[in-house]
Amino acid sequence: MSGGHKNKQLPNGCGSDEMLRCLDPSRDRKGAVLLPFDRIATRYDALWTDTAIGRAQRNLVWREIDSLFHRGERILDIGCGTGEDAAHFAARGVHVYGADASPAMVRVARERGVTATVCNAEELGRIGRSFDGALSNFGALNCVGNLPAVAVSLAPLVRPGGHVAICLLGRLCAWETLYFAARLEWRKAWRRWRGARYHEILIHYPTVAEIRTAFAPEFELRRWTGIGLLVPPSYVKLPAALVRALAACDRILTHLPLLRALADHRLFLLVRK
């Protein structure tokens, strides 16, 4: 669905207050309303990708999923944003096809050499290609209200046995709750429990059970882990050296059942049946 507002996906890493403020409605020089994600496309990497926290969290995801996709395979990047994940896997010899609901994001991705198209997550079937696997990183599907429709549109594109990695903002983030509670900002401290709306953007925080149900029967949830337990959300400002140290701890702690649910993001690893 090119150019519309319905179920627009969040760009990767769009959980921070700073990023969400950038999604406020605006107009171009001719007075035309700019779509939220088109507005931040040229600044997205500076706001998230190239920050110490953004880099640490993305490296944690890559550490978990690099072994899933092999040289010569073809994968679909859902909500590809500016193409950071696509460029990473292309450098490893994996062929990546990107899809994003934001034309401006797709344009930036193409400028860095990524093959990408404008496509809504519920309409992936119209891509008309086959893939060995797929990924969707950092909240691209948190703004999709109909995840079963995503599964139905994705299933015919992924071969049986193909891996699908989905990274979503979690419902309970320990860092976020403590950070805002300490500032007596109670609505922000618990906002993920009730969902959040930013203008026309409705953000959902699905549970593990909801993910498992939404992607069945086409996909099986094999395992999931936390991303960003000690590494905080991007609005928490910490020295880069400290972020790297926290990321080293995260590699161990976010696999523990009682701690992984408290991370900023949750990484779900599914297999096409």
Image: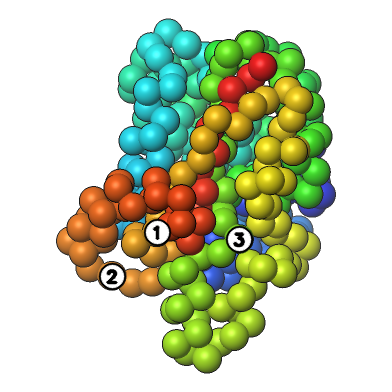
How far is mark 1 from mark 3, CA to CA? 13 Å
Q: Earlier in the sequence, mark 2 or mark 3?
A: 3
At a point 58% along the width and 70% down the height, the residue shown is: 21
The vertical placement of 200 against 140, above or below, is below
Front in this rendered view, residue 138 or 105? 138
Picture mark count: 3
At a point 46% along the width and 50% down the height, the residue shown is: 257
Front in this rendered view, residue 157 or 201? 157
Work out which quarter of the rendered image holds the N terminus and state it: top right
The vertical placement of 271 against 210, above or below, is above
Residue 198: x %, y % from top left: 70, 67
Q: Residues within 10 Å of mark 2 (few under 14, many from 20)?
A: few
Numbered label attached to residue 229: 1
In the rendered view, does 49 fall on the left or right side of 238?
A: right
Residue 78: quadrant of the picture: top right
Callout in the foreground (2, 1):
1
Residue 249: quadrant of the picture: bottom left
Q: Residues within 10 Å of mark 1 (few under 14, many from 20)?
A: many
The vertical placement of 69 against 199, above or below, is above
Numbered label attached to residue 238: 2
**Cβ–Cβ under 8 Å for marks 2 and 1:** no
In the rendered view, does 53 fall on the left or right side of 208?
A: left
What kind of residue is marked 2? Leu
Residue 93: x %, y % from top left: 36, 15
Front in this rendered view, residue 173 or 30? 173
At a point 51% along the width and 65% down the height, the residue shown is: 173
What kind of residue is marked 1? Leu
What kind of residue is marked 3? Arg
Residue 139: x %, y % from top left: 58, 49
Front in this rendered view, residue 206 or 81? 206
Q: Which residue is mark 3?
A: 171
